[in-house]
Image (cartoon, rainbow, N blue to C red):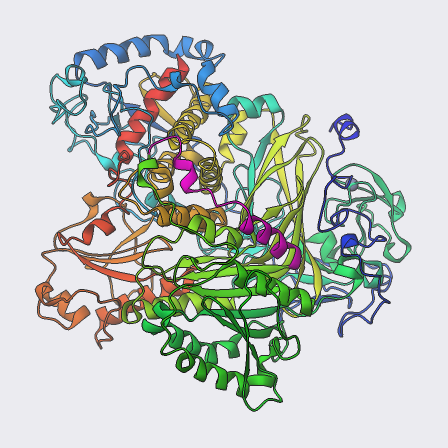
Amino acid sequence: MSQQGYVAAPPYSQAQPGMGAYQGGFGSGPTQPLYGHYGGPPQAFSAPPAGMMKSSVAPAASMPLSPGSSQYNPNVQQNGSHPQSYPAPPAVSAPYGQPPHSLYNSMASPGPPPTQQLTNQMSSMNLGSHVQGLQSPPPPASSVVQQPFQTPPPSTMAPPQMPPGLQSPHMSPLMSPPQSPPASMPMASQSMAGTSMAGMGRPFPGPPPPGPGGFQQPGLGSAGQPGYPQQAGQFGGYMAGPQQNMPGAFPGAQSAMAGPPQKKLDPDSIPSITHVIEDDQVKQGGQVFTTNIRGQVPPLVTTDFTVTDQGNASPRFIRCTTYSLPCTADLAKQCQVPLAAIIKPFASLPKNETPLYVVNHGDTGPVRCNRCKAYMCPYMQFIDGGRRYQCGFCNCVNEVPVFYFQHLDHMGRRVDFYERPELSLGSYEFVATLDYCKNNKPPNPPAYIFMIDVSYNNIKSGLVKLICDELKTLLEKLPREEGMETSAIKVGFVTYNKVLHFYNVKSALAQPQMMVVSDTAEMFVPLLDGFLVNYQDSRAVIYNLLDQIPDMFADTAESETVFAPVIQAGVEAFKAAECSGKLFIFQSSMPTAEAPGKLKNRDDKKLVNTDKEKTLFQPQKGVYEQLSKDCVASGCCVDLFLFPSQYTDIATMADVPSHTGGSVYKYSNFQIETDGEHFLRDLRKDVQKSIGFDAIMRVRTSTGFRATDFFGGIYMNNTTDVEMAAVDCDNGVTVEFKHDDTLSEESGALMQCALLYTTIGGQRRLRIHNLSLNCSSQLSELYKSCETDSLINFFAKSAYRAILNQPLKNVREILVNQTAHMLACYRKNCASPSAASQLILPDAMKVFPVYMNSLMKTAPLVGSTELSTDDRAHQRLSVMAMGVEDTQLLLYPRLIPLHNIDVNSEKPATPVRCSEERLTDSGIFLLENGQSMFLWLGQASSPDLIQSLFNLPSLAHLQGHMCALPELDNPLSRKVRSIISGLLEKRSNSMKLQIVRQKDKPEMLFRQFLVEDKGLHGGASYMDFLCYVHREIRQLLT
Ligand SMILES: [Zn+2]
């Protein structure tokens, strides 16, 4: 590894200029106060919290214990009650046994012009010549994609063949029969998991190519494997079959499409997400994934597996777009595969996995590299008899502090290797010293403030009463520190319309007291003592208050509200109480009352599909910008529950939540009967989430590459410190990496994510996640180690950010170009030579086009005036904070057939592909994507099924607005209800169950989630998109 790059530009050793909140971030040495700017005089050291023992010198030398039996020494605290031992390593880590790539033949289109074209392409790309022909990819694509989203691509990017004006390809794919299907694409059963949000979109800059359409099953190719159902009967011969319905599909393209009709491409023959998910589940489901191997590709997010930490962070915490980085920047540029990690620092772990250990080094704090400030971890190499260690990140040789000295065994490993989590594990926590605390004082426990809009709409709908009633039970369930009997979180209450009402709920009071602040321009908190209280102590007064609130405002006529002053009040309250925490704001409408942050309706559908469309996504500057800053500096996270009946400028109202790690929930036209339970499920999940406050995250890397960009519910004052007022178990931060030197195959690439935060109990901690990746000078290694689900998370976030500054059309073009480029580069450099007409995809990326096409059909990326501006802005912001599981599900929903379900089986029902073709008139299907859930009833559903599920004689008796299945005592009803409740339990958000009958009007809502079909608001079918991408690839290769 080159030292020079480091010396020339130390990646992380220096505090960045302009670092605001934390002087020197927590990158500076522990001897200096890290909260310099808070200015308070350092306080005397106060005793560490109970149970935190000062570290002692490690026990006398002894042979290291095996991983299966090791025990940590007493200064290691466990988060949970799990046994202090490592589970035995799995017998075998699941091999990646798939063929290197899947092979698809594109079929020659029957029409004369396309055939001609294809022939030309084929002749220029035959075995001998195609590699040579590819030495340099066409400049337009590469130049555009190299700088994704920086500049609009030149208009020349649009393929010349495409007639202008066409929105999406809607030709039927054509195909010729396969000679023999590839093994990697079984055709029989479909399973899948996924989610898509809104199926819509205009994927391509121009219309689809008139030319050669579909794909055929490959010939044998490398993917040809036994066990694949034969299709011979279905497809009699190569190129057989008449072309259907082509003429007229594209204006101007008729002639191209004229010709002998052809058989339609069998959808089963193109790569299927449900198959990929099912295969991985079969191969790796139920197994243990041990993290002891560098660059190991984990099972898919959809696979059910168990993780054993043996030196690298669990994939639940960090996933990467590839686990083998290219050695040089040139290689990275050549393939254009983004190098990124998606970090979920607070991811929930299943019960059978060990919670993170907490290491306490007392007042010396964690051991860190003197130069780059990386924390002690398995990548530190001890030398010189254990007296010194070399940092794996910057190579600096450090003295081992006296208290930390330990002898090395004959392998050169510290004898306390297995006793110290920071030497042997990928993830662990350190107790932070006062140097890591604001004003050098231990933090106070966080507080939750419930701020209820009591204007006319919320009172009339019954919402205020619903919230107040719920809080009585919900507050009993506030999250608490492991081992504690009660929650340390304080609670406070505010109601508001045009003015704010604060409540004194001190336990000594017989009645709560209200204090009104009507000067919303100069917000202050009128009371300190008694506003933020311990719920247990003040339960009686709080009950009293919650009973009274709905009555107090029952006759209100006030319909105007403020919003920014409400957030400001929360910030002021936290400042006064010297704590961090979360605001739960329940707001009905856009704030139009005269006050800071007043908004007006700026929705304008005429901007859709113009260069100004981006302004619909941009928040209003000014008040909210400053509020975000204030919130982050105070550790104030904002959750917004919106109940709008019209446009509310979510782009602006959600600005503060989206910079503070908060969530925005939207219940349009809220009705208590149909939406009440749905909202309460969200509220309950949100209040009870595991969460950390006042967080700051730094990602360090070994020399040669570094983190350059960050996407998430975050705030950044400088280029390296990721600030989050709060981070919960669902927040994912996507980090992009770039080379700044050559990486070494031998040493690989290391990253360390360090998150400084305050626990719900008020402890300051450092959570460390380490991950080591491979490096290779062979692009084939990179493609083999790619993770499609992570890639699409990165693309979704980067595209959703790009639309703030660029026309949507450009962003979509870049997405398509980069897709084609990544796949063309694989074809050129990694695939065995084959005919140009074959579409060859890297095995690990074979379903990437499905996701990409689905992404381009999501509401934010589709230029359609039929979509609500608020919905588009809302989805854009939600996705920015998602982890890999959530984007996967959003972009490929689960479609589960229920009509033929085995009611006695414990196995989860197997999903099918998200396409209309999978529906049957007599079928009943459940569809969900983590945000929406539908029960679709075919018009010919059996009356028996309807009777069992609804207790109705037929579909015709079904009344609208049903939002839950009745509780009926029969096996089918129980089974279906348990599937639904299982999904609601598992997902991070609640979903409202919408019941739709085939051919009824609301069915349209459901259809937009069938992401393999043509988009309802524009956007290609999967098949057409694949054809289009294939054409682009061939262009790049010529
Ligand atoms: Zn270092």
Q: Position of residue 604 (x, y in %)?
A: 34, 41
Residue occupying the point 18% across, 31% down: 232
Any part of residue 1012 in sight: yes
Q: Which residues are magenta?
A: 609-634
* 210 left or right of 461 in image: left
Q: Check the image and report above or below for 161 versus 421.
A: above
* 458 left or right of 628 in image: left
* 102 left or right of 943 in image: right
Any part of residue 87 in sight: no
Q: Position of residue 829 (x, y in %)?
A: 48, 20
Q: Position of residue 169 (x, y in %)?
A: 25, 28
Residue nearest the observer in this picture, 544 or 230: 544
Q: Check the image and report above or below for 136 versus 702.
A: above
* 372 left or right of 308 in image: right
Q: Check the image and report above or below for 544 versus 996.
A: below
Q: Quadrant of the N terminus?
A: top right
Tell me if residue 58 is in the magenta stretch.
Answer: no
User: In the rendered picture of this protein, how many numbered marks are placed on residues?
Assistant: 0
Which quadrant of the figure has residue 390? Answer: top right
Tell me if residue 631 is in the magenta stretch.
Answer: yes
Residue nearest the observer in this picture, 12 or 120: 12
Q: Quadrant of the C terminus?
A: top left
**Is the stretch drawn in magenta largely helix, strand or loop?**
helix
Tell which quarter ligand 1 is in: top right
Residue nearest the observer in this picture, 255 or 781: 255
Residue occupying the point 57% across, 52% down: 317
Toward the bottom, the furthest residue is 510
Which quadrant of the figure has residue 394? Answer: top right
Q: Position of residue 555 (x, y in %)?
A: 36, 78
Residue nearest the observer in this picture, 687 or 403: 687
